[in-house]
Image (spheres, rainbow, N blue to C red):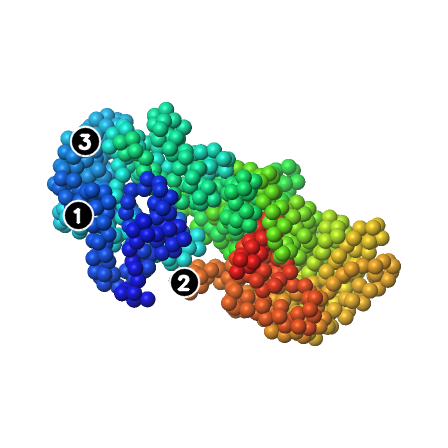
Amino acid sequence: MTISENKFVYDFSEGNKDLKNLLGGKGANLAEMTKLGLNIPPGFTITTEACLLYFSDPKGMMEKLKPTVMKYLKALEENTGKEFGDNKNPLLVSVRSGAPQSMPGMMDTVLNLGLNDQSVLGLAEQTENPRFAYDSYRRFIQMFGDVVMGIGDEKFERILNKYKRTIGRNAQDTDLGVMDLQKVIADYKALYEKEIGSAFPQDPFEQLFLAIEAVFKSWNNRRAITYRKINNIPDFGTAVNIQAMAFGNKGWNSATGVVFTRDPSTGENRKFGEYLTNAQGEDVVAGIRTPKKFEDMKEEFPEIYSELLGTMEKLEKHYRDMQDIEFTIEDGKLNILQTRNGKRTPSAEVKIAVDMVKEGLITKEKALLGVDPKKVSKLLFKSIDENSIVHVLAHGINASPGAVSGIAIFDPDTAEELANQGQKEIILVRPQTKPDDVHGLYAASGVLTQFGGKTSHAAVVARGMGKPAVVGCSDIEIYEEEKEFRVADMVVREGDYITIDGTTGRVIEGKVPLIEPEIKGEFLELLEIADKLKTLGVRANADTPADALKALEFGAEGIGLCRTEHMFMAQDRLPVVQKMIMARTLEERQDALNKILPMQKGDFLEIFKIMEGKPVTIRLLDPPLHEFLPELTTVQLESQELKMTNALSRSLLNISPLDNEITEKKKVISLIRSLSEENPMMGLRGCRLGIVWPEINEMQVKAMFQAACELKQQGINVIPEVMIPLVGMISELQFVKAQLMQVALETINEYNVDLEYKFGTMIEIPRAALTADEIAIEAEFFSFGTNDLTQMTFGFSRDDAEGKFLPIYLNKEILENNPFEILDQEGVGKLMKMAIELGRKTRPDLKTGICGEHGGEPSSIKFAHLIGLDYVSCSPFRIPVARIAAAQASIENKKA
């Protein structure tokens, strides 16, 4: 695209709402409302394409634009009967940004443009309202100086406040008289000349083109870039809207305000809004005066109130969405300055969508497409009351959503002990969590760590448990021995209250007011609509009966991942598990496994019973065995202490009572060293563990099938699915499956029942995806472990990547998204698509799903639908999000 090719300027009468990407949301809607016959101050829009071309050739683009802008400005003069730059009857304009996607407050606006020292006199004479003229001029100098020339707004405010104080302590802008405003203007111009080095520009055309450039540049200001990153808004560029001014500051028969066609906080079908008399639009936004309620307009401006009500109804029906409308009343005449789909809370978003379906305003499909699944997740967790005043201590990574207040506890044993005593408000604070901290995590209400990323142990477990987590909070420094953490000079000790916000990553001092989640009413109705429209199944990642119950409550259609290692971590089992690992003979190991079997069976019994009639996919033991053993340094320290005690006993009493314990410690140290690996995530784990130590998997399958068969005898329908992890070769799967099938068949025959079951594998190694046609000979289902598949495809170590270089990659735009949060469709996704196609060539009825955390991320769910997966599986608290995203994927796919 070159500068000479395109039409860069559109009059409001030329555009429409469908040209939003070209004219921006504001320009497209102003054009649409002009067509609807509403009272819109006339104007024209410079396109987003012009903005993008400006950045590649600023001088050339401005030269190209000037004659076209002058042409449209002439038409605007004819339309209004005023002349731009005229000293007697000046046309004044606003110059406003307007991106295709709403970015409120992120870019720039200039009002009252066109005034100078001469035209302000003409405006005062023409309107017979000198105060209005000088108030408009002082506003213009302030906005131009701030927005266009970069003079800090606070410098102008200091001057304004100085004159307000001469009138009285609580004086408002409206209390300033003509002479006061003239003095303010003189001081503003002196400030401008001091800061810029030249006088305030008196040529309105120079003012206009400088303002247009400033709005273009605001697309790439820091706050706009940050907002776009946070909200995943593409680099559209901004349009520039040049519009004849409507004045709300002409006196007490004029006003400005904002109204919503429904309550943006609750979603109730009632009109909501605020306005200020004798003011301009920025006064309402800035909060410099307390606005009046929309209802007050009924008394103050009864005719305008009725007209505005009619306009609100008309616009909501036309756009079929709740509208946020800006208006100005000038001398008793209503002007509409903007309409857009209103920002709303998650609960309001759901209520509005469902209510509009009932009202016949929108279809069920449109209702679902209008809901942001990410926002919906906030309805499932407590959140901080944003009206409360909080003291933020630090920011970390928002790893698991929700907010919670509790006492800071620095070790998992104390957390468990306090929980057993009835303490319900506990936040576990750790440098990072390990698998053997799981009992403390379970006891706590939330977790805060100094290190780690969104896929760290603390993050994954907290999400699975539905508990808020802030991880990788490098702002804090934890002193475990002193049981405290520090942020600069602030010290938080054990027992002190803190609040963590896992939705935003904030760590806050003390207890703060929290808002309870509500899962009822319209939310449930929306989910029921989603279930009727989606084709993709939604299962849960659930490791405990409590998880399974929560999953059912949120609408899970089965369990897509039950991780058995979390069962092994229970405090009453860990010693037996460690005994099994440290066994010297097969008999000793089998003896320990025989003790673990009834525990595993009990877990499976409960989960199968809860999920009656629904598939339950159980992953066999996956992590490396050293994770179940104590830390090497801890055991070495204990061994050293025993040696010192023993030496003291020998010297004083001539005995060595601790020889046996020392010998045992040495054996443990030796075992930990023997199991230690350079890269344990790619070492002895998964199916490799089942090949080297087959008796572990055999015990798990026996427990699983015993539980299933016992329930089947009781008339309870059970559908177990055995998932063999980390398979990279068909030979691995054949070897492990053959052993386990024998155990399964023997158990089924022993109970003499008919049992529906499957054996499948987790696709998490690229080689498995590449040879999926072979793997499918043995596997009846594929479950994509996208966390590990992402790690191995990129060659990233998750925690190291998120802690060391991923933030830099994202900041430098080497990566668009964190691939552990949003599925990499080009690389990992291509492997998945290939695996599905290859696998179904071998086995047409092959079941496929995702069981990584991507299973709860909306864009990843939509990709899963496109490549033909049968289901996604995610933590229980993300199931409603997945149900809505799955329905949206189905609707969008049908449209395509």
| Secondary structure found at label 3 | loop
Question: Which one is nearer the viewer's eye here, 781 or 804?
Answer: 781
Q: Residues within 10 Å of mark 2 (few under 14, many from 20)?
A: few
Given contact means CB atoms under 8 Å apart, are the residues at marks 1 and 2 in contact?
Answer: no
The mark found on residue 813 in the picture is 2
Q: Which residue is mark 1?
A: 204
Q: CA distance from mark 3 to mark 2?
A: 53 Å
Residue 391 in picture, x, y percent from top left: 43, 39
**In the figure, 16 relative to 173: above or below?**
below
Q: Which label's residue is closer to the chain start, 1 or 3?
A: 3
The quarter of the image holding the N terminus is: bottom left
Q: Quadrant of residue 341?
A: top left
For residue 315, say whether it is visible. Answer: yes
Residue 896 in picture, x, y percent from top left: 52, 60
Q: Which label's residue is closer to the chain start, 1 or 2?
A: 1
Q: Quadrant of residue 852?
A: bottom right
For residue 412, say whether it is visible. Answer: no
**Residue located at (63% from left, 41% from top):** 419
Q: Which residue is mark 3?
A: 129
Relative to residue 493, is residue 71 drawn left or right?
left
| Secondary structure found at label 1 | helix
Q: Which label's residue is closer to the chain start, 3 or 2?
A: 3
